[in-house]
Amino acid sequence: MYKVKHNVDGSVSKYKARLVAKDYAQTYGIDYEETYSPVAKMTIIKIIIVMVATKGWYLHQMDVKNVFLHGDLQEEMYMEQPLGYVDQTHFNLVCRLKKALYGLKQPPRVWLDKIGQYFVTSGFQTFNVIFVLYVKKIDHGIVIILIYVDDFIITRNSDANISDLKKLLKQKFEMKDLGKLGYFFSIEVI
């Protein structure tokens, strides 16, 4: 898929290309077992924003670049060579997928599995009901991370060392630091 992203004034911001698999060719029980991946509900997002506002904390936002490419496929999957990129000397060959491409049924689940394992091994706790909320007690307080697919909302009881956490996340996953949260799903945060 090719896409042109525009600025507010209509000028071209950037050109994007994304390799997308054809999920209609996947068969349950062969190519995938489970597709479900929880996301943060609007109620939880609002509760976090209200809690942070009443405590005077800051909310930060990070965005994971090419989020699904971070997920490792467990299933053995193949796809035809993409149009326009067919090796003319080996046109009968197919591509074995190691990463979860957009368009497949399992990328949200394998991404959440990977990031969840990272947070748990880093000392965060999650909850049986809210799988996308991670909390870690630290020396002088608490860190809270809420995930909505490729967007992270991060807060803690002080801004001290929050940049250290962001650096760690950027080292592990390619991420963009969006700074203090301004807008999130049509909610303006001031």
Image (spheres, rainbow, N blue to C red):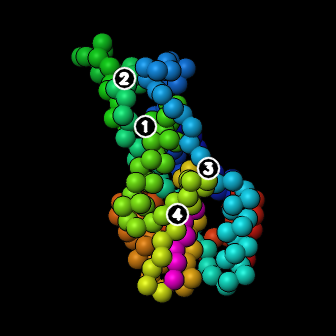
Q: Is residue 120 magenta?
A: no
Q: Quadrant of residue 36?
A: top right
Q: Earlier in the sequence, mark 3 or mark 4?
A: 3
Residue located beneath label 4 in the image: 134
Q: Residues within 10 Å of mark 3 (few under 14, many from 20)?
A: some
Q: Secondary structure at mark 3?
A: loop
Residue at 48% x, 38% y: name it. Answer: 107
Q: Residues within 10 Å of mark 2 (few under 14, many from 20)?
A: some
Q: Can you give x and y, in whole percent of width and height, for residue 149 in the image?
A: 56, 50
Q: Secondary structure at mark 2?
A: strand
Q: Amino acid at mark 2?
A: Tyr
Residue located beneath label 1 in the image: 100
Q: Amino acid at mark 3?
A: Val
Residue located beneath label 2 in the image: 78
Q: Amino acid at mark 4?
A: Tyr
Cα separation, mark 1 vs mark 2, equals 11 Å
Q: Can you give x and y, in whole percent of width and height, for residue 174 in the image?
A: 41, 57
Look at the image and tell me whether residue 31 can be seen. yes
Cα separation, mark 2 vs mark 4, equals 34 Å
Residue located beneath label 3 in the image: 39
Of marks 3 and 1, the one in the foreground: 3
Of marks 2 and 4, the one in the foreground: 4
Front residue of this view, candidates 81 and 46: 46
**What are the residue bounds of the magenta stretch?**
141-146
Q: Residues within 10 Å of mark 4 (few under 14, many from 20)?
A: many
Of marks 1 and 4, the one in the foreground: 4
Q: Earlier in the sequence, mark 1 or mark 2?
A: 2
Label number found at residue 127? none
